[in-house]
Image: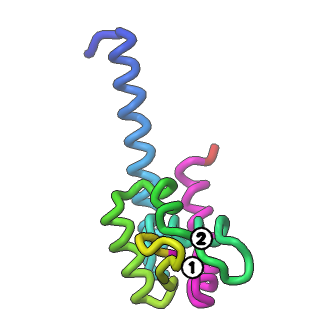
């Protein structure tokens, strides 16, 4: 049995957080599999639904990068996959050639709406109570 020091308690707390995170991601991945989505895919769609300006305006990928816990290259691959599936569209920023915009397609909005209650139920199962 480990020492009951502040450092040991902090380490134990950190490992508990990691375990809850891993369980939650696994539960969400399993629940969303029939929709062709994983937890990270859904997170990007969810952020686009909740943070995209109205009427088809686009969101900069850079703004998503700070909210999705993926590396820049992993996020780029994820967005490319979502684009291939017809769920998002990408475009270049006219004001800043380095900038890339992403927005939901109607199909992406529909898939998000279908998967939303399933994802929230998975969250409730793992984090609720």
The crowding category of the residue bearing disc 2, from other C-alpha atoms within 10 Å (few below 14, some 14 to 19, many at least 20), is many
Q: What is the chief secondary structure element of the magenta stretch?
A: helix
The span picked out in magenta is: 101-127
> Which image quadrant: the N terminus?
top left
On the picture, is 91 further left or further right than 121? left
Judging depth in this view, the residue of 61 and 79 nearest the camera is 61
Provide residue 94's location: percent of width, then percent of height.
52, 79
Query: On the picture, is 39 further left or further right than 71?
Result: right
Q: Which of the marked residues, 1 or 2, is nearer the chain's N terminus?
A: 2
Name the quadrant containing residue 129: top right
Q: Nearer the viewer, residue 82 or 19?
A: 82
User: Do labels 1 and 2 touch, CB within 8 Å?
Assistant: yes
Residue 67 percent across, percent down from the top left: 51, 55
Residue receiving disc 2: 48
Residue 103 is marked as: 1
Q: Quadrant of residue 29?
A: bottom left
- Tell me what residue is drawn at x 38 percent, y 58 percent: 70
Vertical placement of 92 versus 50: above or below?
Answer: below
Q: Residue furthest right?
A: 54
């Amino acid at each position: 049995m480990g020492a009951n020091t502040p450092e040991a308690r902090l380490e134990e707390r950190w490992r508990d957080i990691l375990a809850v995170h891993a369980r939650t991601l696994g539960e969400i991945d399993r629940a969303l599999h029939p929709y062709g989505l994983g937890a990270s895919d859904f997170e990007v769609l969810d952020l686009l639904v909740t943070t995209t300006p109205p009427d088809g305006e686009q969101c900069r990928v850079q703004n998503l990068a700070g909210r999705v816990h993926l590396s820049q290259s992993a996020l780029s691959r994820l967005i490319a996959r979502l684009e291939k599936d017809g769920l998002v569209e990408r475009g270049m920023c006219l004001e800043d050639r380095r900038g890339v915009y992403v927005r939901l397609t109607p199909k992406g909005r529909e898939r998000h709406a279908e998967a939303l209650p399933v994802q929230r139920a998975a969250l409730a199962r793992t984090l609720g109570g």
